[in-house]
Image (spheres, helix red, strand yellow):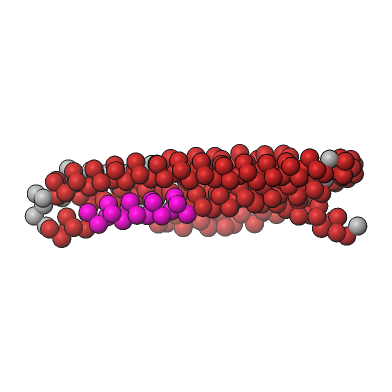
Amino acid sequence: MDKRIVTTSLAALMAFTPLAAFAQTDVNADLRAEVRQERKDAMEERKEHMEENREERKEFMEEHRGEMKDLWEERKEDFKERHQEIVGEFKDRMEAAREKWEEHKENLKERLENFSDEKKAEILLRLIDRAEDINARVTTHWTEQLTKMREILTRVENKADELGVDADEEIQAAEEAIDAAQASVDAQAEMTYELDVESEDASVDAALELKAKMHEDLEAVKQDIENAREKLRTAVELVKDAEDDSADE
């Protein structure tokens, strides 16, 4: 594109942008103020609803404290059982993936024997080892993180019962997000990345494609982890605010 055209376009944009921004200032300010007021009204309405129900829930807790303790213990046992189930299934997936990795590496070694550049062949084999190691370590770490999230969520649920806080919606959202993230992690743990080496000349491009694909997959799972963490944070903050209010009373 002609630099003069680009320069002229940029100059025109710079000339008109302040006018457009000025024209939109009042409109944007009004919209922001309206959105803030809507959020404030919604929060006030929910707070009033929570206050109305809190005393009823507290009375229920006093009347059924023994039953609630049994429920908390049941949740604790459910957490332990679920944890053992997840860990066992995860180990099975990792073992199945390891066997697939090994099979691929054996096949790759045979194809690399025809390479004239032995150093390049060694680098490609190390790349596969590295990919396997990273995938195993990252998915293991994420599984541990999700386990901690479940543990925190169990405590939050118990504390919500104790305080008489209506946090069912937030707790359910967090639980669903954690389960969805675990499903993504499990699927990633089973993933193997094969280096499709059609020729020695094309091996570098194949290696770059493998790294790019793996990075893309890991980033997608990471987003699910972050979503679960955000949902959990919402539940935690709701119950924490209620606990602070209760302490001030």
Q: Main secondary structure of the magenta part?
A: helix
User: Residue at horizontal 82%, vertical 49%?
Assistant: 163
Name the spot of residue 210 as percent of width and height, x first.
30, 48
Q: Is residue 89 left or right of residue 121?
A: right
Judging depth in this view, the residue of 136 and 125 nearest the camera is 136
Name the spot of residue 45 as percent of width and height, x first.
85, 42
Any magenta on residue 186?
no
User: Residue at horizontal 42%, vertical 45%?
Assistant: 91
Q: Is residue 102 left or right of residue 20?
A: left
Residue 60 in view, yes or no: yes
Q: Is residue 11 left or right of residue 34?
A: left
Judging depth in this view, the residue of 151 and 113 nearest the camera is 151
Give the quadrant of residue 67.
top right
Q: Quadrant of the C terminus?
A: bottom right
User: Residue at horizontal 49%, vertical 51%?
Assistant: 142
Judging depth in this view, the residue of 94 and 142 nearest the camera is 94
User: Residue at horizontal 18%, vertical 43%?
Assistant: 107
Name the spot of residue 19 as percent of width and height, x first.
66, 54
Q: Is residue 103 left or right of residue 167?
A: left
Q: Which residues are magenta?
A: 125-141
Image height of 39 relative to 126, above or below? above
Residue 49 in view, yes or no: no
Any magenta on residue 136?
yes
